[in-house]
Amino acid sequence: MLMKQVDHNGTDESIRFGDIFTDDQFKNETLITCSLIPFGVDWKKQQKEIQDEHDKMGDNGRFGAGLPRVNDGSFLFFSI
């Protein structure tokens, strides 16, 4: 639908540009997302920001399930 530029799908604030790990644009919102998880992609560029957030928020943050190896970003998406 976004490719078709449907007016009621994506022209409001529900779509925001940025890096979900280092620039959380939906901080105070609970989201259910459908995304392509980056299998086999490392998160070394975002490691400092992610580690800082994990240290600060602990089990109550986005990375409450813990942090995986830096060479596999797919496990950062498991937060339950």
Image (cartoon, rainbow, N blue to C red):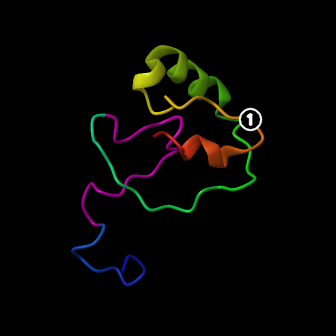
Q: Position of residue 6 (x, y in %)?
A: 28, 80
Instruction: Name the spot of residue 78 as percent of width and height, x first.
Output: 54, 44
Q: Is residue 30 above or below residue 13?
A: above
Figure quadrant of the C terminus: top left
Q: Residues within 10 Å of mark 1 (few under 14, many from 20)?
A: some
Q: Which residue is mark 1?
A: 70
The residue shown at (48%, 47%) is 18
Residue at image coords 59%, 57% = 37
Residue type marked 1: Val
Residue situated in front as seen by the camera: 18 or 49: 49
In this picture, which residue range is highlighted in magenta? Answer: 11-27
Please state which of residues 31 and 49 is positioned toward the viewer in this rendering: 31
Give the residue furthest to the front: 80
Toward which corner of the image does residue 62 lie, by quadrant?
A: top left
Q: Tell me: 65 left or right of 17.
A: right
Q: Secondary structure at mark 1?
A: loop
Q: Where, by quadrant of the figure, is residue 10 drawn? A: bottom left
**In what quadrant of the picture does the N terminus appear?**
bottom left
What secondary structure prevails in the magenta region? loop
* For residue 47, side relative to residue 50 (left or right): right
Identity of the residue furthest to the bottom in this view: 4
At a point 54% along the width and 46% down the height, the residue shown is 77
Q: Where residue 56 sits in the image (x, y, percent)?
A: 47, 15
Residue 15 on the magenta segment: yes
Front residue of 25/54: it is: 54
Q: Could you say where residue 54 lies in the image, as x and y percent from the top left?
A: 53, 22
The residue lying at 49 percent from left, 39 percent from top is 79
